[in-house]
Amino acid sequence: MLLCAAAAVVVGVGCQQKTEPVTEEKELAGCQVAILLTEGFQDQEALHPMDYLTERGATITVIGPAVETVKAYNSDVEITIEKTVAEVSVDDFDALVIPGGQSPARLREDETVVAFVREFVESGKPVAAICHGPQVLVAAGVMDGKRATCYAGIAQELIDAGVEYEDVELIRDGNIITSRLPQDLPVFSHAIAQALTEKAGGQ
C-alpha cells in the first residue's frame, strides 16, 4: 500500500481518496517522495519537482550516496542530501524522482544506488527521470523494451539499452516517467503528481 493511500484511510485525505473537499494544494497529503541526486545535479530539474509536489502536500526527502551538501553544475544552488540510499528502503517512499545534469553519471557508478533504483522500478511505484536521469535507469537494467525520452545527447545510450526512444516532452510507460529538458518540467512534475494520485486510487 502506498504511504499516501494509507494516510487517506486515516485522515480522509490522500493522493486521491478524499471524503470531503480539500484544496488542490493538499491532494498529495501523506505522499512520501524521494529525490535522488548527488554533486552536479541540474538545479531546475531538482527544485521544480520538489516545489511542485511540496505545494500539493507531498513530503520530500533528498537521498544520495552520502549525507552531504552538493552543488548544481549550472548554478550556485546547493541541496543537502538528508539520507543515504543505504539507510532507506523502497517501502519508505511512494515515488522516486531522478533529476538530470552531471549527477546521474555519478549515481550510476554506485552499485547500492543502482540496486535501489532497480528495486523501486520493480515495485511498481512511480519512477520519474528527466534529462540525463534515465542513465541511472539504464544502469539498473530496467529499460529494455520500454518507451522513453531523455536529453538528446544521451539518446543513443537508451537506444543501445533496448529503449524505444522518442524526442517528445514526456513519456509514461508503465510506472516509468521520462522527460528531456528543463522546458519540460511543468508537464514532468504534473505527471508525477498524477501518477501518485492514480496509484493511491488503485490501492
Image (cartoon, rainbow, N blue to C red):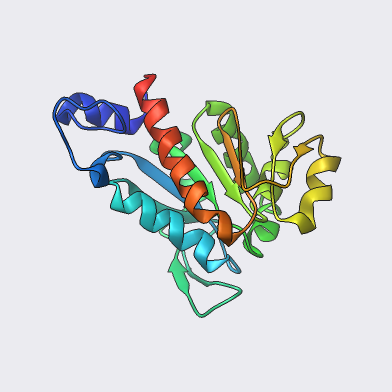
Left or right relative to 78: residue 197: left
In which quadrant of the rendered image does the N terminus lie? Answer: top left
Name the residue rendered at 71%, 54% in the picture: 109
Total number of numbered discs in the rendering: 0
Name the residue rendered at 41%, 45% in the picture: 33
Whether residue 180 is visible here, answered yes or no, is yes
Q: Position of residue 140 (x, y in %)?
A: 69, 40
Picture quadrant of residue 18: top left
Left or right relative to 14: residue 185: right
Picture quadrant of residue 92: top left
Residue closest to the eye, 46 or 80: 46
Q: Residue furthest bottom?
A: 76
Name the residue rendered at 31%, 33% in the picture: 15
Q: Where is residue 125 in the image (x, y as percent from the top left)?
A: 49, 31
In which quadrant of the rendered image does the C terminus lie? Answer: top left
48 is higher (above) or lower (below) than 142: below
Left or right relative to 172: residue 202: left
183 is higher (above) or lower (below) than 167: below
Name the residue rendered at 57%, 61% in the picture: 182
Q: Where is residue 172 in the image (x, y as percent from the top left)?
A: 59, 34
Q: Where is residue 153 in the image (x, y as percent from the top left)?
A: 78, 58
91 is higher (above) or lower (below) than 135: above
Residue closest to the eye, 113 or 123: 123
Residue closest to the eye, 76 or 181: 181
Whether residue 88 is visible here, answered yes or no, is no
